[in-house]
Image (spheres, grey):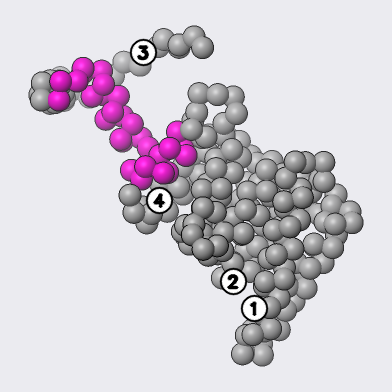
Amino acid sequence: MAQKKYQRGIIHSSETIKIILDHRIDDIAFLTKQTTSNIVENALLDGLFPKNRYARDIIQANLYGDTDNRGVKETLIALFRFNSTGCNWLSKYRNFMPLLDFCLLYVDKQARLSDNNGVFTSFLNDFHSIANYTERCAQQIPDHFERSEYKSITNWIKMLYDTACNDPSKIYIIELFKVIKDLWLMIDDWNTTYFLLESIVTMGEFIETVESRNELYNIVDTISQEWGD
């Protein structure tokens, strides 16, 4: 692959700032035996990307990678796949609600489910598991009003599952995100939820703009601050 050669020069706000930066970079270069170019590059990477190493890797590889297969959709797939890798059937983290809200906002509202897709069988299996699990959970809720509310949601998810089995093109992708959000408190710590979300994102399409990429970046940068190292 041919390397792209380009240079973006820095126009300093003042000569004083230029001198300060040059002196600091020279000192770091001397102490670390690095080139000044490496120091500037590392400083830019540290300043422009998340501090968390997992979030940084996902963003760099999928949102701003050096291939054509990059963008909002690829980044969401990578994020949900990453969070499905917890132990004992659990998700790694429980702070992914902002990403679900992002999906609801930026998914193509006209996109429909299709069985002509490599992940459709996995989607059905995971969707069926969540439908059964949430129905059992709803039956155990002691408060009558809350139990009735969740029962109506679990009836909705069962209806969506039956439709997905028989005529998937009747289901809009956004409906799947909506029902998952309504059941979020029951399923946000289960890795199957994130397997399911990965499949749904794979079958959907998302708005790809500077604004959507930046909003997704900001969400990942914020939630990843709770991920430890």
Q: What's the residue type where badge 1 is placed?
A: Cys
Q: Which residue is mark 1?
A: 137
Whole-percent x, y for residue 140 in the image: 64, 85
Identify the element where label 2 is drawn.
helix
- The disc label shown at residue 224, or none: 4
Q: What distance separates the C-alpha of mark 4 from that of mark 2?
A: 22 Å
Sequence-earlier tag: 4 or 1: 1
Sequence-earlier tag: 4 or 3: 3
Sequence-earlier tag: 4 or 2: 2
Q: What's the residue type where badge 3 is placed?
A: Gln
Whole-percent x, y for residue 14 in the image: 18, 22
Asked if the stretch drawn in magenta spans residue 155, the answer is no
Sequence-earlier tag: 1 or 2: 1
Q: What's the residue type where badge 4 is placed?
A: Ser
Whole-percent x, y for residue 178 in the image: 68, 61
Other-residue count near label 2 (Cα within 10 Å), few / some / many at <14 / 14–19 / ≥20 = some
Q: What distance separates the C-alpha of mark 4 from that of mark 3?
A: 31 Å
Whole-percent x, y for residue 160 in the image: 80, 62
Identify the element where label 4 is drawn.
helix
> Which one is in front in this view, the residue at disc 4 or the one at disc 3?
4
> Which one is in front in this view, the residue at disc 4 or the one at disc 1?
1
Q: Quadrant of residue 77?
A: top right
Q: What's the residue type where badge 2 is placed?
A: Met
Label pair 3/1, CB-CB below 8 angstroms: no
Q: Which residue is mark 2?
A: 186
Stretch of the chain drawn in magenta = 32-60
- The disc label shown at residue 7, or none: 3
Residue at 57% over, 34% down: 71
Sequence-earlier tag: 2 or 3: 3
Other-residue count near label 1 (Cα within 10 Å), few / some / many at <14 / 14–19 / ≥20 = some
Q: What distance separates the C-alpha of mark 4 from that of mark 1?
A: 29 Å
Vertical placement of residue 162 versus 16, above or below: below
